[in-house]
Amino acid sequence: MERISFFLARYLVAALTVLGVLAFLAIIFIFRLLGIPLVLWSAVIAVLYSFIAMMVFAMIIKRMETRAFDRLGKRMSKHRNGDHPASRGSLDDLDDAEIDRRLRR
């Protein structure tokens, strides 16, 4: 499933790139028709592209944070359930036979 989504994501990125170029050309054409100077419309396009880049980076960072918190949540649930070695209690609470059995694992 993950492989299929990666395969489709490549085509999505390609389609968005083509749409971005077409939008860029449309903005240039419209500004030319309106008689807006080159310096002004190039500044507007730069601001638009920087805004889009910020949004993309924000989405990437949010996804990375979500994955990190998911991994942290899985680790914490192991502690709560007693599946993690650190949550099994201290060695002071165990007798010698139990300590030997755990060391042999």
Image: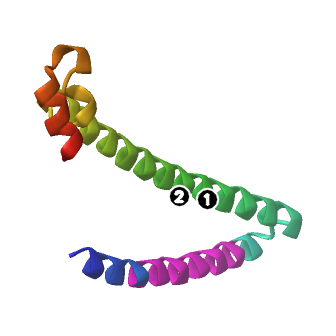
Who's the residue at 18% across and 35% down the image? 100
* Secondary structure under the numbered disc 1 in the rendered image: helix
Q: Is residue 21 magenta?
A: yes
Percent across and percent down for residue 104 are 20, 45
Q: In this view, does 17 lie to the left or right of 94?
A: right
Who's the residue at 68% across and 57% down the image? 50
Circles 2 and 1, Cβ within 8 Å, touching? The answer is: yes
**Residue placed under numbered mark 1 in the picture:** 53
Q: Is any atom of residue 77 visible in this view?
A: no
Percent across and percent down for residue 3 are 28, 80
Q: Disc 2 residue type?
A: Val
Q: Disc 1 residue type?
A: Ala
Q: Nearer the viewer, residue 81 or 32?
A: 81
Percent across and percent down for residue 9 are 38, 77
Whether 28 is drawn above or below 73: the answer is below
Q: In which quarter of the image is the N terminus?
A: bottom left
Percent across and percent down for residue 57 are 56, 55
What separation in Å lies between label 2 and label 1 (alpha carbons)? 5 Å
Q: Nearer the viewer, residue 28 or 22?
A: 22
Q: Which of 68 and 16 is in front in this view?
A: 68
What stretch of residues is rendered in magenta? 11-30
Who's the residue at 24% across and 35% down the image? 85
Q: Residues within 10 Å of mark 1 (few under 14, many from 20)?
A: few
